[in-house]
Image (tube, helix red, strand yellow):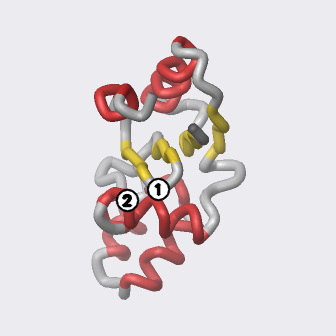
């Protein structure tokens, strides 16, 4: 099992996801979206697993102007903007190979063990 948690240090759900895997002694890699972000390959893999890039957009993100702009961009430009501004991606994104979840989803993660 190769767990990656894409989140932010301030996100409560990211912290809860880390705790979930720590309590079960499952090794994971934490990637801070604000510091490193996602590579295009990681982003494509996650968006394919969850049903599209639009599902990764956080409607409660602080950057309301960017959220409004995303509605009018082509898919390619939208992905580019999301990679440049990871603050609009819902945290945490938890990835296990080709599987991925958005947000705190312990019921799904239990099935990965």
Picture coordinates of residue 44, whole percent (x, y):
49, 69
Distance (Cα) linking label 1 and label 2: 7 Å
Q: Which residue is labeled 2 in the image? A: 49
Q: Which residue is labeled 1 in the image? A: 98
Q: Do the residues bearing badges 1 and 2 touch, measured as CB atoms within 8 Å?
A: yes
Q: Secondary structure at mark 2?
A: helix
Which of discs 1 and 2 lies nearer the camera? The answer is 1
Does 51 appear above or below 110?
A: below
Q: Earlier in the sequence, mark 1 or mark 2?
A: 2
Picture coordinates of residue 84, whole percent (x, y):
59, 68
Label 2 Cα crowd, 10 Å radius (few <14 / some 14-19 / many 20+): some
Label 1 Cα crowd, 10 Å radius (few <14 / some 14-19 / many 20+): few
Picture coordinates of residue 90, whole percent (x, y):
41, 48
Position of the N terminus, as image quadrant, is top right
The answer to which quarter of the image holds residue 76 is: bottom left
Identify which residue is drawn at 30% across, 83% down. Answer: 72
The answer to which quarter of the image holds residue 86 is: bottom right
Position of the C terminus, as image quadrant, is top left
Identify which residue is drawn at 45% across, 59% down. Answer: 46
């Amino acid at each position: 099992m190769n767990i990656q948690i894409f989140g932010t240090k301030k996100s409560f759900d990211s912290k809860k996801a880390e705790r979930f895997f720590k309590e079960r002694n499952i090794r994971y890699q934490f990637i801070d979206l604000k510091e490193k972000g996602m590579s295009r390959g990681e982003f494509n893999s996650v968006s394919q697993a969850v049903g599209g890039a639009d599902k990764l957009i956080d409607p409660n993100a602080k950057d309301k102007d960017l959220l409004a702009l995303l509605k009018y961009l082509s898919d390619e430009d939208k992905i580019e903007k999301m990679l440049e501004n990871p603050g609009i991606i819902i945290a945490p994104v938890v990835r296990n190979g080709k599987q991925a979840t958005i947000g705190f989803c312990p019921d799904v993660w239990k099935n990965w063990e």
